[in-house]
Image: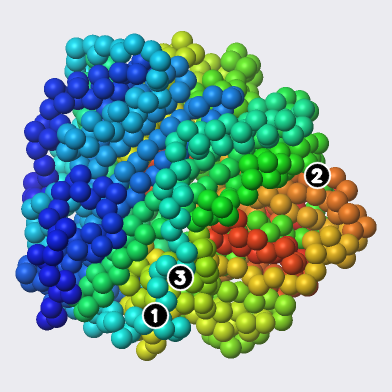
Amino acid sequence: MSRNASRPDVDFADRFPRELAGELLAIAREGGADFSEVYAEYTVQTAFALDEGRLKRSSVAVLEGVGVRANAGAQTGYACADGFLPADLREAARVAGHIARDGGAGRVAPFHVTDSPAPFTLSFPAPLALDEAAKIAMLRRADEAARSADRRVREVEITHADSTRRFVVANSDGRWAEDRQYLSRFSVAALALEGDNRQQGFAAAGGCVEAGYFESERTPETVAREAAQSAITLLAAREPEAGSTPVVVAPGWGGVMVHECFGHSMEGDGIRKRTSIRADQRGRQVAAKGVTIVDSGVVPFSRGSFRVDDEGTPAQRTVLVEDGILIGYMWDLLNARIMRERPTGNGRRSSYRDYPLCRMTNTYIESGPHTPEDLVADVKRGLFCKHLGGGSVNPADGNFSFVVTEAWQIEDGRLTHPVRNATLTGNGNDAMLKIDAVANDLKIDGTTGSCGKNGQWKPCGVGQPTVRFSEITVGGTAT
Amino acid sequence: MSAPVRDPGAAGARVDGAAAQGSTPARLRDLGALAVECALAAGAAEAEACVESTRSFSVGVSGGAIETLKQNVTRGLGLRVLVGDAVGFVTTTDLTEGTLDDLAHRAVALARFLTPDPCNAFVTPAEAEGADGATLPEDLALFDPAVRELPAEKKIEWALELERLALAFDPRITRTDGAHVSTHDGASAIVNSNGIARAWDSTAVTAYVVPLADDRDGRQQTGCYGVSKRWLRDLPEPRAIAAEAARRAVSRIGARSVPSARVPVVLHPDIAANWISEMHKAFSGEALLKESSWLTGKLEQLIAAPLVTLVDDGRLRAGIGTEPWDGEGVATRKNRLIDRGRLATFVYDVYHARRAGRRSSGNAVRGYSSQPSIGFTNLYIEAGAQSPEQILKQVDRGFFMDDQGSFGFNSVTGDYSYQAQGFWIENGEKAFPVEGVTVASNSLEMLKNVVAVGNDLRFDHSVASSTLLISEMTVSGRAA
């Protein structure tokens, strides 16, 4: 394993000893808080970017500090400090503890180290094993491959970014958990030009992967050609027909629909506060028969996976919907404690600067009985969504929308021509009930997704097999 | 090689974490100068430091009780170095003594991997001067001592009051998704080895509430309204914010879809503001250079109705997007991007301005943890003459759009396609609330199809617009 010249490291245990952690937990409970937690982090992020054929950007960022949380009932006090200076951390603990004023000081249980097994291990994590020269070579190979894919490819932007994140989380219940998380992301955006027509294609690779992944599974050339091909395809695409139509969504990243339309409404905070429509739906049919929906933090090599979550709870596989019936929710520590549920390893935060929220890991629809071809063959007129872009949902009213970056028109069971600029919209309350066929080709995309909630961004995976919705509103300009 | 601008032995240059917290602008500038000096000593030909220190506080309440109280005291330094015309960039949140030297060496090591480009040279004081001479940061009114001194108890009280007032607005509002008040108090410094040494401080205060109104079948409708200001006294009364948010939630009760149609669309100021913030990338000198802008080749052409003037004003007094200098230390300016329909200019940072043989327009945007990129400051469409009511009256049959999804803009093509909520318009009046539709067009068509601009320009945030009337867009809903 080579070592990066520009990647710093630090002796974590030296900077954040257990005695200090214990002291901070006690300070945060001095006002009577019933729970306190400290989270110490040391993260290094590196990035290289090539565009116009030039290596224009490189960066190494170090993010280090400690966040202290105190809970009193459903109330949260939080304060953080950059770095590890004990005086700063004690101040943060006092500020967080102010959430409770009137109670007696709480005690802090002796620490027990969480030693849950890792869902998978990496021998040569890409962020450690790839040095600067190796990353730059990947960028140049992708540039060459995208430009030689088609003469209409005008510009190519390629980025390699990775991070190593180390943290310790300890709480007043005596939990002490540590983890190291490695993430890599390699992405290519290709711009194709033909007269006044300009289109951009995008493709990515990565996850929590071995260095060898970029040679054996998704090479820079593969990613570059996908991006170039998508841009070229879009040059010939037509505007979508506006209206309601059957929609078939491709496997893998298409799972962003179940993430937005359904997953967010299953997070424990909305269930406890009853701002989610799912709060009373346990045991009820919420998706079509044959649809099983899972959130799992243990999917191998995905960026949504980990050994323990950001509260130290071991990752697990949680079945949310089994054969269309809602059987369980996702829980973080705070919401599980109040609702007397078992935490499911869904307590996550973007860094020590934020308190944890209940949120998804890798969320996907399990495989069904059909072949992907069957799903298209039965459609007289509809839309096949090959690449979805971003999507969003308002969990309170359920309204969702997705951008479809590359779609194909289905006519009499066959894909006839590419379609661009389509938007899928609807209401999450019934979207999963409109699934009328699930294929047998499950793919989980753990390469590139990030989810935003309350201003915090967090890596996650999404997945599904090919899935068909009986009817979705497609926005477009052709009528 | 240029000399560093500040004597690193100056008072306050000794660095430690406690001292950096709540730092004065002058102190951050000294710290930046020290980092620049370390970089030159490590072998950089030029260097630039961006240093920030912030104290932010936020309270969220729900159901009449505090839900979250959060205080963040953060600081950080980003160091850019130039070695053989190539740039290396490193950032850290650890400002303890001894780390700057290590940081500088890593930045220099990193630069050696990159492609040399003479346009990378950092800005000089002569290039960085403003169009209107030397305006002092104080003249821009970015810092309000009252925001810094506002007690936590007062902020908690306001948040509780916001929620209470929203709940009291209408019996159908039975809960909220929270009311929030936050304050931000920060100092920034930009220092480079060519003699740039800028430092200033600023404040911001934000209040918003998200009422939920009960609708049929156990469903609920969301209203959300909030305002950000630099000065406490500019923030509207809690009653006004709560009423606006509550009115939005209640007005959506009973919303339904409509058949697909091509009709005139009235864009609420919030929706128009979101559109121009998405469009801004097309005005970037970088996109122009790479031909990735849908405005490529259209400079000086009429791209919009003559009613449309689009402005990016970095010097708007007390504006939430105002800064005295941009992320490279260049004085900000007021740039007219569209002048009465004509594409008047693209905007630049230093690197892309050099590539284009121009001067930076003061549009480099960054925090300490990112390198400069082209962005906007206070972006708005200049107000027109008509009231929103007069605009509505012009529409016999159409759609009034006042809420939208998050994704739906293609920055390469200008294609616009958003999930939308609002009202169906019949005979110049709002007939009934609408949801479950998308609204689509292309930005070039929309710009040309602006047939009315309202007189209701209001800066709730850094991007703003009046009500706009677009003569035709595609509204897609249920089958006709």
Q: Residue B201 got which mark?
A: none
Name the residue type under label 2.
Pro
The chain identifier of the residue carrying mark 3 reads: B
Q: Nearer the viewer, residue B442 or A20?
A: A20
A462 relative position to A412: left or right:
left
Which label's residue is closer to the chain start, 1 or 2?
A: 1
Position in image of residue B113 (x %, y %): 16, 68
Name the residue type under label 3.
Asp
Q: Are marks 1 and 2 in contact (CB under 8 Å)?
A: no
Which label's residue is closer to the chain start, 2 or 3?
A: 3
Q: Identify whether B343 is placed above or below B158.
A: below
Q: Secondary structure at mark 2?
A: strand
Name the residue type under label 1.
Ala
What is the spatial separation of the Cα atoms under label 1 and label 3, in whole angstroms?
10 Å
The quadrant of the picture occupied by the C terminus of chain A is bottom right
Q: Quadrant of residue A89?
A: top left
Which residue lies at the image location 68% right of the left edge and 49% below the top edge?
B403
**Label 1 Cα neighbours within 10 Å, binned few <14 / some 14-19 / many ≥20:** few
Position in image of residue A32 (x %, y %): 36, 15
Q: Residue B134 got which mark?
A: 1
Q: Secondary structure at mark 1?
A: loop
The chain identifier of the residue carrying mark 2 reads: B
Residue B459 in sight: yes
Q: Which residue is mark 2?
A: B433
What is the spatial separation of the Cα atoms under label 1 and label 2, in whole angstroms?
51 Å
Q: Which residue is mark 3?
A: B139
What is the spatial separation of the Cα atoms under label 2 and label 3, in whole angstroms?
45 Å
B77 relative position to A370: left or right:
left
Position in image of residue A142 (x %, y %): 30, 64
**Label 2 Cα neighbours within 10 Å, binned few <14 / some 14-19 / many ≥20:** many
For the image, the number of numbered tags is 3
A108 relative position to A395: left or right:
left
